[in-house]
Amino acid sequence: MRALVHHSFGDPAEVLAVEEVDTPEPGPGQVRVRTLLSPIHNHDLWTVRGTYGYKPELPARAGTEAVGVVDALGEGVENLTVGQRVATGGTFGVWAEYFVANAAALIPVTDDVDDETASQLVSMPFSAITLLEFLELEPGAWIVQNAANGAVGRLVAQLAAARGIHVLGLVRRAAGVDELAALGIGDVVATDADDWRERVAAITGGAPIVAGVDSVGGAASGEVLSLLAENGTLVVFGAMASPVMEISSGDVIFRQLTVKGFWGSKVSSAMEPARRGALLGELVTRIREGVLTLPVSSVHSFDDIAAAARENFEPGRVGKVLLRP
């Protein structure tokens, strides 16, 4: 079968290439899935670069989320059938024509969810809803997040609104405000405006902002932290611009702020299965209601991985870049 493989860590556009590899066979409790579509996530490309929390042995495959069709069942698998459409958000190596996954890690996809939506149903939406759970917010509370026009930022805003939580979004340029407005997401401020802090105050009406989410790093971390109320919490979700956070010690000390990290896979693995299932059910419900949208920027073949990887980091992109075998 064909699969994307890299023999060294580095720029995904340069090190990833299609190779012929053996088609895997499912073991006990496993399922072989024929890949239909797979989204590119930042963490997928950071893994290829060798800069993520998980570093695979080389040569390595890539990709972690996909929708596909069950192709073969391993011994003891009874809850799935050949030909059934399934999704996974935590199976490494899905950028291949076929992949093997634990049957328990696969989510059956109903007929009313299309392939493009199903392919990105688990990872980013589940991270967003798990992040809201992690913050333990009450309806009516205000939070602030940067990278508001990123995939997770957009999902957090949509899911939070459905829960009665107010989200103040920060973007780096004015065009980002318009992009989000076109998706029905408001309360967004561009930090390139001189009066952006005044705009924040006008939007919140002076209400306390109890939590912040930083996905950027650098000076942007300090911008989010500076808006938090006393005893507020800054959650570090990512570091798109810089691995170093520039925050004011005075803000932390005198307002008794808390700074902590969030890694979705760790939080999810510690979650009770019943709660995990309930959150996935909430995601599907929000998609059916039209509250949660999962737009697609483009679809590329595996052979076009270099262009797809470059497009993933283009400013202003709306929607996920997807791969197909």
Image: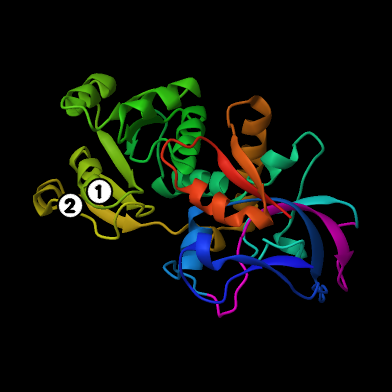
Tell me the kind of residue under disc 1: Ser
Can see residue 126?
yes
Q: Secondary structure at mark 2?
A: loop
Q: Is residue 294 visible?
A: no
Q: Position of residue 254 (x, y in %)?
A: 9, 48
Residue at 31% from the left image edge and 34% from the top image edge: 170
* Disc marking residue 221: 1
130 relative position to 31: left or right? left
Q: Which residue is mark 2?
A: 247
The image quadrant that residue 7 belongs to is bottom right
124 part of magenta stretch: no
Q: Is residue 94 above or below residue 236?
A: below
43 displayed left or right of 227: right
Extent of the magenta region: 56-81
User: Which residue appears at 22% of the width and 44% of the height?
Assistant: 225
User: Observer-nearest residue: 69 or 7?
Assistant: 7
* Of callouts 2 and 1, the N-terminal one: 1
Residue at point 38%, 54% (across, down): 238
The residue under the point 19% across, 53% down is 246
Q: Position of residue 96 (x, y in %)?
A: 72, 63
Please tell me whether residue 198 is drawn above or below residue 147 in the rendered image.
above
User: Magenta span: helix, strand or loop, mainly?
Assistant: loop
Q: Position of residue 235 (x, y in %)?
A: 33, 51
In which quadrant is the C terminus drawn? Answer: bottom right
* Contact? badges 2 and 1 (CB < 8 Å): yes
Q: In the visual, does 106 lie left or right of 121? A: right
Mark 2 neighbour class, 10 Å CA radius: few under 14, some 14 to 19, many 20 or more: some
Q: Position of residue 308 (x, y in %)?
A: 57, 50
Characterize the local packing of mark 1: few (<14), some (14-19) or many (20 or more) Cα atoms within 10 angstroms.
many
The front one of 9 and 27 is 9
Looking at the rendered structure, the kind of residue marked 2 is Ile
